[in-house]
Image: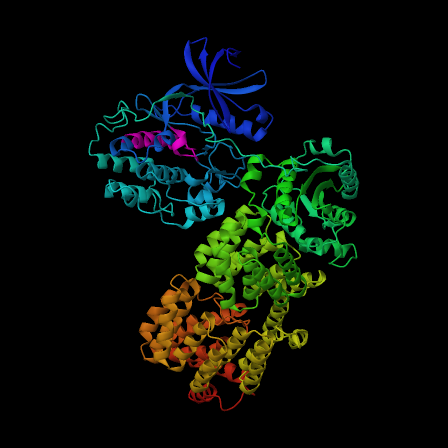
Amino acid sequence: MLGTTISHYRILEKLGAGGMGVVYKAQDIRLGRFVALKFLPDNYADGHQLRDRFQREARAASALNHPSICTIYDIGEADGRVFMAMEYLDGVTLKDLAVVGPMELNRLVDIAVQVLDGLEAAHAQNVIHRDIKPANIFVTSTGRAKILDFGLAKIKAPNRARALEGGEEEPASGSGDYQTSGGGALSTMPYMSPEQALGQPLDARSDLFSFGVTLYEMASGKMPFQGETTGVLLLSIVQDTPTPAMQLNPEIPPELRRIIDKCLEKDRELRYQHASAIRSDLKRLRGDSLALSSGSSGVVGSKAIDIPSKKIGTAAQVPSSPVPVVSQVSETEPSRRVTWKVWVSLATLLVTLGIGGLFYWRSHKKVVLTERDTVVLADFANSTGDSVFDDPLKTALMVDLNQSPYVNVLSENKVAAALKLMTKPPDTKLTPEVARDVCQRASGKAYIAGSIASLGTEYVIGLKAVNCQDGDTLAQQLVTVPGKEKVLDALDQATAKLRGQLGESLASVQRFDVPLEEATTSSLEALTAFTLGRKAMSAEGEKAAISYFKRATALDPNFALAYAGLGTAYANLRESDLAKENYQKAYDLRSRVSTREQYAISAYYYNDVTGDLEKANQTYELYAKADPRNWVPHNNLGGNYAALGKWQNALAEVREAVRLNPDSGIALGALMEYECRMGRYEDAKSTYQLAASRGLDYSDLHYYRYGVAFLEGDAAEMQRQRDWAAGKSGREDVLLSTQSDTEAFSGHLTKARELSRRATESAHNAGEDETAAKRELNDAIREVEFGYPLQARSEVASALGLSSTRSTRVLAAAVLARAGDIGHAQKMAHDLQEQNPSNTKIIGYWLPTIRAAIELNRHNPAKAIEILDEAAPYELGMPGPQPELGALLYPVYLRGQAYLALHQGSAARAEFQKYQDHRGAAINSVLAGLSPLGLARAYKLQGDAAKAHAAYQNFLVHWTDADPDIPVLKQAKAEYIKT
């Protein structure tokens, strides 16, 4: 283009190129001035999103007239090329200055103040830049700072709701900086704000956080948030407190550190609210408001620029290094002669693999597969005769494709549902023909068939994507490898090429492409065991999967996904310490897996290892945003909300999980549970029927159908659910224990004890000793509340002999505190706090409960009430670890007892009334059964004899055929006589 004239601009020299444009120095032949001309790249000329973004940059910047913002003169189109004419600048970017290390303080403050002037002007016009970083701040040779590149800017209508901001989806710029896109979290990643990382609505304060990151980098020479992968970096932005800048650069004054720290507040309400406030603090730091006023000449202190200046246009974001290209495994070794016999064999093999003479032009045909399109994976065709290739290659291909934000692989549950509609068993082999039928039934776009065959000492891998509607081949790859140990690497590279052929950009393929040997394992045998484990968990349950996952980790001790699978199996079996152990191992190896799996593993780690539900929830939100088609983060996030007592939030999340995977028994079980706990019994029964109509038989569906039947007094349905569980190892103990609570609810203590014994024995025989211990501890809670403290202490000792885990020690401490064993309860509570400093459920719910129980035993009810204030936010939740149906609402019960001890009848009544108001949460728990007695005592203290008499009568009628010697019953009868 050099020497040509575009419109009225003569092109003089090329200044640079980046993902959003190519920039030339040009002369405006009408006005005689130099300008920087920015052109949309030729390969993006037809991209509507990029054209819109390019034009938005011009509109946003041209709406602003400020000396600290690069001026836009013109935008136009000539010969089919869109261009923008901008102010021509002579100088360097802050990114260029950063290469020499921390910036001298006076210069840094001068530049920062000018940038803040520009940001204040932009924000005043309701323009949010959204990509403040050193590369977008230019320092001219005269010292004037200019804000560049409004390509990501959002022009915010002043009266529109904030929820509308940041919601558009745009492609990453592909400049050499690491960026993310979609869902509003578009920015250069290391500089984005926490709200951008979480995809939340944005306002001007997001720019101020990015400015703080820039200020930190310029002052210290380092980045505040770091991570080797996308997932780790996003988690760092959302959760980590950066190393104090003063530790990296001792010359930074404390006031500048305070300013930087306030800019980097995670909570935007605690951050600076306006650019002017930062500017004022920086001026005070400098102590020379006149020299730093917004009308200053722009001279950078008294020093010259330390590195040679360069003439550059405002959009010249030149990549620091060439973009690497995903390489293709060569079909033959370069130095090897290929005989005619081998070529004949190869030709025969191509036919066998279904890759014929149209391979070349088909592989170059441009095909676009959108993220809305679904693909089905066929089983690999294995003609090698080696069974090691039967299953793992499909698993590896699925892991590889699931890294892509553009390839939507139909889940195994949905494949099974489609096969059912086709009257085929769920383990039907997915040949290309069957895969095409499944794809059509699922309204998919394509199926992908893989194959492996041997060619002498080599292996040949083929991948082919086929339009499942018309049978046309959309894309295909063929690679050869010299030995078995290279098969996964070859499959990885072939998949990357296939993704590109299906329309995914090279930048996206490179960004979301953790090598298979890292994302899974280098051992085909370990991958086979892992694959069998996943199948077993889906078809037979968690217990069947454990041996396979253990074998996978034995074959490859660095197999992160296998440890995560073990952790999930144990977590679902309520073996919390074994879950913790394996989630910890997976977390330690998380850098080896893909971004999405990093989110999953990190969330499991926070959930089950540290117990920090705030961090777990943040991570699940990032997980859901990175993988918007995945139901798992929504399901698990719902579980956390349920633990915290946020039932509306829990219901919303699990509904989304069911929408994404309507054939998941786990998600439908969770939906049924939350409907039950919120008192929506008809909805819960409808969910149960829906699951049954789909042939789903997940355990929780039966447990909560029993719960609804109990709440509705449906004895026949309760019996049906008990019959379902009878004799099922690993299942019957739940309903045996639940039935024991039902018996105790009416004072049938002898029956309850026998059922608890059977539940404990059943769990122990199933190899689930932690669960067995919890069954016994559930009985111990009942014993102490019914008035048998010595029996309760004995059961605690027996339970801890079975399993002394974090979960069992929590329940044991609570029982001992209620039973009057204060010394042991205090010691256990102290140890629990020391060992679990960030565990939300232990710190927020259980420790206040245990300590309040201790104070009640010390006859200090006022202190107990004060302590229980800490548990108030969580008291209506399901914090575990008791695995029964009914929530104990223990803080509520103890607070009611404390108010009774203080003779505050009205306050006590309000607490016990919560059990009546939240029947669906409490269901058949022992404390729910005793709450009517608490109400009677509260009415008596209030002096309301009629209500007290009725409440006592209600309790005693319900306990008409109760075991007569129960202490709490004897006491209730004595009190009733006196009303």
Q: Residue at x 51, y 91 (%)?
A: 964
Q: Residue at x 56, y 83 (%)?
A: 757
Residue 573 position (above or below residue 229):
below
Report the colour scheme: rainbow
Q: Is residue 740 left or right of residue 317?
A: right
Q: Which residues are magenta?
A: 110-137
Q: Is 354 or 244 nearer to us in this picture?
A: 354
Q: Quadrant of residue 544?
A: bottom right
**x, y (%) of residue 595?**
52, 47
Q: Residue furthest bottom?
A: 965
**x, y (%) of residue 339?**
75, 36
Count the labels in the image.
Answer: 0
Q: Residue at x 73, y 45 (%)?
A: 456
Residue 708 position (above or below residue 362):
below
Q: Is 581 or 182 nearer to us in this picture?
A: 581
**x, y (%) of residue 878?**
49, 66
Q: Quadrant of the C terminus?
A: bottom left
Asked if residue 116 lies in the magenta stretch, the reply is yes
Residue 66 position (above or below residue 164):
above
Residue 197 position (above or below residue 177):
below
Q: Is 147 or 312 nearer to us in this picture?
A: 312
Q: Quadrant of residue 698?
A: bottom right
Q: Residue furthest left?
A: 287
Dominant SS in magenta:
helix
Q: Quadrant of residue 705?
A: bottom right
**x, y (%) of residue 472?**
76, 37
